[in-house]
Image: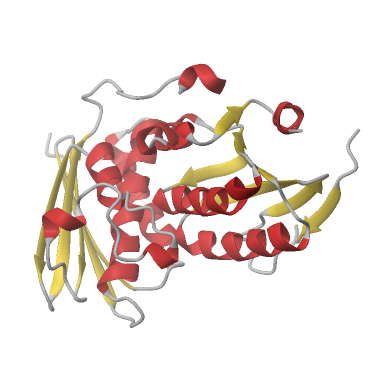
Amino acid sequence: MDNTNRMILEFESKSKNESFARTVVAAFAATLDPTIEELADIKTAVSEAVTNCIIHGYGDCSGMITMRCTINGDELTVEVEDSGIGIEDISKAMEPLYTTRPELERSGMGFSFMEAFMDQLEVESVFGEGTVVRMKKTIGKHAFKGYSQKTGQDAV
Amino acid sequence: MQDYRKYGRPHNKSGKEGTSYEISQRCLIIRLDGELDHHNAIKIKDKADKMIERHHIKHIIFDFSDANFMDSAGIGVIMGRYKKVIFIGGKIAVVKVNSAVDRIFRLSGLYKIIDKYDTVETALNHLK
């Protein structure tokens, strides 16, 4: 059976659209019959990517964010693109805890979360022109790593 | 049981961000509502900081009962508040975290500086 699907969404770089964007991707991915955990992973990763476009890509200006989603078999691909300032040093930007906006209390965990919650992460950027983040995740294939039912101190 | 003073607006106009704030002695209880992302983080930060200053707050409890989503912005909110109370010997606690939020706390290493409890009451008893 042919299981392919595509969608493209364009929206303004407003923080209220973070919730909109991740909800749309979650709804789009629903046909793959993901678990609650897989959906949570996708939503968190999309939220990080979109927040990056708003805070870093466009900063105090406003612009459009394009999100392209593809389903191919049981694999979901999400591309989040902005035409903002771009990233000068991608490997530096991807370092855990590195942030250029500490005054906004950014934790510097954005790319780390995208890497942790998706199977594959690619970042392409041209300084001064914009950034594309491409994330892939296979649904229903992997047993969950990192989930725990433990509560309290013993879960630390 | 507790003499809670209630703050916050349960019937928020936008109907989206309905986080409420309660104070029990010098403990601020932040009952998160909905989604703790960058958008809502800005409002929660501002409100929490005002209350921390005005009411000489020492400890903060984040109640995740009604929070179904969090991303790295939530880590920023908690770390920022931690930095505010740590100098006066305050502590941060989180309660009722679901498995997705729990995973984010563990990945970020936040449990090294905050404590997790099952209920607000248990957290209050430990913090006092």
Q: From the viewer's perspective, tell me whether residue A126 is left or right of residue B28.
A: left
Where does the image place residue A137, in percent across and percent down from the top left?
20, 39
Identify the residue at horizontal 60%, vertical 49% (top origin).
B87
- Give the camera-side residue of B38 and B29: B29
Where does the image place residue B55, in percent across and percent down from the top left?
78, 57
- Give the camera-side residue of A133 and B23: B23
Where does the image place residue A72, in percent across and percent down from the top left?
13, 42
The residue most toward the bottom is: A61
- Give the camera-side residue of B80 and A127: B80
Q: How many marks?
A: 0
Where does the image place residue A69, in percent across and percent down from the top left?
21, 54
Identify the residue at horizontal 25%, vertical 71% (top origin).
A57
Q: From the viewer's perspective, tell me whether residue A41 is left or right of residue B93.
A: left
Q: Quadrant of the N terminus of chain A?
A: top left
Examine the rendered structure and indicate whether residue A63 appears above or below residue A119.
below
Examine the rendered structure and indicate whether residue B64 appears above or below residue A97.
above
Report if residue A151 is visible in the image. no
Report if residue A27 is visible in the image. yes
Identify the residue at horizontal 71%, vertical 33% (top origin).
B127
Identify the residue at horizontal 45%, vertical 23% (top origin).
A156
Q: From the viewer's perspective, tell me whether residue B2 is left or right of residue A29.
A: right
Image colouring: secondary structure
